[in-house]
């Protein structure tokens, strides 16, 4: 009965209010004002993911964006055969599907749920474009997070290059200190939850603020 009363309390003239959805579970959504949240409410749905679920596949049509509430979404790329590496991680501090904000209608990377089961709020692409026209501040908040992710991905590349150079130098000169192997699998998709960091965990990096 309590659940039914809660459902009734979250409805006004048959329309869900923003408190009917767990906006507090995602840092970006918490930054939005009530008017922006209200615009999103009719189009959002809560979806579950199990650890290892493929959320998106590179090359497929990007038909939605997702705001994780729990769990970690690993952004994966392939370098050698079928071996995939995490180039970025997104948790409840952000969203995935930023390709749609950048004019790309296809996923550029595989996205897999890692570390644990998770949930997210999904927004269809068709609704997204209309909402961004009516509520431009939402676009600003989302694009600021995209900048955070791009920074994370560039640092991943620099870290990998630096490790490769140190390893090569050590191979050429046995007298040089051997590089640590701890970072060798830093971004290996199979160990992503143990080593890689989310944008919100980077020093001096915080979720975008409106």
Image: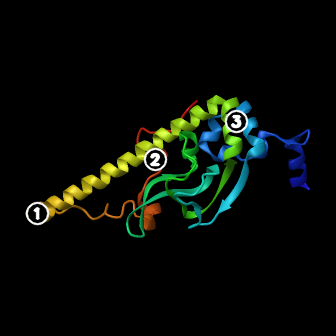
In the picture of the structure, the residue carrying the numbered disc 2 is: 201
What's the colour scheme?
A: rainbow
Picture quarter with the N terminus = bottom right
**Left of 119 or right of it: where is 168?**
left
Badge 1: residue crowd in 10 Å (few <14, some 14–19, many ≥20):
few
Q: Earlier in the sequence, mark 2 or mark 3?
A: 3
Local packing at callout 3 (Cα closer than 10 Å; few below 14, some 14-19, many 20+) is some
User: Which mark lies nearer to you, 3 or 1?
Assistant: 3
Front in this rendered view, residue 132 or 42: 132
Relative image position of residue 9 (x, y in whole percent) = 88, 43
Which residue matches tag 1?
Answer: 172
State the residue at coordinates (24%, 62%): 180
Q: How many marks can you see?
A: 3
Q: Residue at x 42, y 46 (%)?
A: 152
**Residue 114: percent from left, percent from top:** 53, 63
Residue drawn at x 90%, y 46% is 8
Q: Are marks 3 and 1 in contact (CB under 8 Å)?
A: no
Q: Position of residue 41 (x, y in %)?
A: 76, 42
In the displayed orientation, state which residue is furthest to the bottom: 82
Give the quarter of the image for residue 17.
top right
**Depth-wise, is mark 1 or mark 2 nearer the camera?**
1
* Residue 94 in view in this figure: no
24 with respect to 173 (left or right): right
Q: Quadrant of the C terminus?
A: top right
The crowding category of the residue bearing disc 2, from other C-alpha atoms within 10 Å (few below 14, some 14 to 19, many at least 20), is: few
Residue 116 seen by the camera? yes
The residue carrying mark 3 is 131
User: Considering the numbered disc 1 on the image, is that residue within a helix, a strand or a loop?
Assistant: helix
Q: Does 2 sit above or below residue 127?
A: below
């Amino acid at each position: 009965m309590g659940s039914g009363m809660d459902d009734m309390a979250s409805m006004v003239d048959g329309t869900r209010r923003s408190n009917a959805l767990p906006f507090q579970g995602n840092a970006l959504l918490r930054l939005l004002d009530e008017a922006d949240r209200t615009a999103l409410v009719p189009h959002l749905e809560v979806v579950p993911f199990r650890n290892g679920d493929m959320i998106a596949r590179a090359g497929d049509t990007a038909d939605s964006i997702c705001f994780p509430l729990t769990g970690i979404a690993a952004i994966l790329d392939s370098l050698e055969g079928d071996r995939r590496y995490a180039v970025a991680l997104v948790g409840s501090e952000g969203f995935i599907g930023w390709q749609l904000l950048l004019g790309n209608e296809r996923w550029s990377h595989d996205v897999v749920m890692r570390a644990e089961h998770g949930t997210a709020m999904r927004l269809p692409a068709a609704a997204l474009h209309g909402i961004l026209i009516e509520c431009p501040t939402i676009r600003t908040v989302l694009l600021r997070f995209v900048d955070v992710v791009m920074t994370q991905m560039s640092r991943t590349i620099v870290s990998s290059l630096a490790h490769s150079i140190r390893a090569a130098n050590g191979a050429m000169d046995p007298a040089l200190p051997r590089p640590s192997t701890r970072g060798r699998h830093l971004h290996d998709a199979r160990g992503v939850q143990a080593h890689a960091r989310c944008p919100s965990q980077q020093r001096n990096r915080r979720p975008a603020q409106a």
